[in-house]
Amino acid sequence: MSVQEYLDKYMLSRKLEDAVNAAVRAKTSDPVLFISNHMKKGVQSVITKVKARQILDSRGIPTVEVDLYTNKAMFRASVPSGNSTGMYEAVELRDGDKGVYLGNGVAKAVKNINEKISEALIGMDPTLQSQIDHAMIDLDKTEKKGELGANAILAVSIAACKAGAAEKEVPLYKHIADLSGKTNPVLPVPAFTVISGGKHAGNNLAIEEIMILPIGASRFDEALRMGSETYHHLKAVITEKCGPHNCNVGEDGGFAPNVSSFREALDLVKEAIGRTGYDEKIKIALDVAGTNFCIGKRYDLDFKSPQKSGQNFKSAEDMIELYKELCTEYPIVSIEDPFDKEDWEHIKYISSLGICQVVGDDLLMSNAKRIERAVTESACNALLLKVNQVGTVTEVIEVVKQAKEAHWGVVTSHRSGETVDSFIADLSVGLAVGQIKAGAPCRGERLEKYNQLLRIEEELGDQAVYAGEDWRQ
């Protein structure tokens, strides 16, 4: 085939002429670069390769990272992991070899991506998120993604989502909004972890987290400033009252003072808020994680103190009275997992009181069937969304729609084992969930999410909307 025949066959002469004309109209200073980019835009993007590797998360435990290649660029994604996994969530595939990373390696998941998923996705259009996700679901053939591993599937799904946004030449949050049918992106209210307890810290505090929500801020950057200032005031309060050795932090960046009672910890936070002058603008949220200290049908508030364990048991009715008192004494607007994950009766009752938002985490595990039951029984009124419990971007969008149709709040959440991937920031804005829980305003893997939200707000400019007082959307 001659050069002219080649040009004619692929209509390159016409395409090149169009590119040159566009360069002339643009008066570009670098016509070669301009023409090259113009020609590239005329070619449909397709997936050419998916390459995975094992990396370490913020706890030093292995997780999955993926590089997804198209004929135009490479897109990277990594997935988080939690301290515990439930029977109703998608399966995180681990190697189980106790001699390597104590059994926590993810070589099997990596192999599944490199040898199975990559081959199945080659040639697919990255803008067709649902088709990509369902191709992986069909390849896995199990209800909870136990064959390929949800950690393998999710990493590829997120990377494909990033590639799809790039192909459409729109920000990631805009692409996610398009996929979900949303039209107005919203910057979420951040729930900053300021005190860590439970399984996230080595102190004696039973509950897992105390968070602050700057719902009175007018913009996200103002909310971030309020969170940071309160966090540093809290450090000073803890130093004064408990000593500097109590300023160590937990896995998600919250301080871990050696306190044991709810009120003792809440008093520290309340004083820190008071020192900022933001009293009316900052509210408090609790992640109780009641399942962790439920023994039978009672709750051991001293389960982390061997010398005291078993001496401070509370019934579910006692816990309800405690929550009612705390919501009266402190500006608490949200309680997550106030009871054991199977105690539907008492979760339903406390939700009926209307004293605060009641968030289902262990109760729901971001599982569509559990959410459906909770909606039917009015068991809670907010979903804690953990993307790795679901397994694909498409299914994440569906469970958020399910929660929103029930007029629930939605809290996009990080995990204890995080990476520097900021996907959940864009997800929160694109789906307009109204709330994001990404840890303390401390530690790089947590701040990456908050800093990405700053960038998004800057990019949106005058069109930026901060959830603020409408945090439950």
Image (cartoon, grey):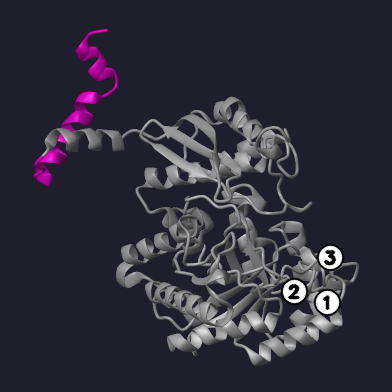
In screen coordinates, is 292 left or right of 268? right
Viewer-side residue, 93 vs 232: 232
Q: Nearer the viewer, mark 1 or mark 2?
A: 2
Do the numbered discs 1 and 2 sit on residues whose CB atoms are within 8 Å?
A: yes
Q: Is 27 one of the magenta-colored residues?
A: yes
Mark 1–mark 3 Cα distance, whole angstroms, equals: 10 Å
Q: Is 437 one of the magenta-colored residues?
A: no
Residue type at mark 2 is Pro
Q: x and y percent of residue 313 in the render?
A: 86, 76
Q: Residue at x 43, y 81 (%)?
A: 217
Give neighbour class at mark 1: few <14, some 14-19, many 20+ (Cα, 10 Å).
some
The residue wearing badge 2 is: 338
The residue wearing badge 1 is: 346
What is the span of residues highlighted in magenta in the rendered image?
Answer: 1-29
The residue wearing badge 3 is: 342
Quarter holding the C terminus is bottom right
Viewer-side residue, 13 vs 100: 100
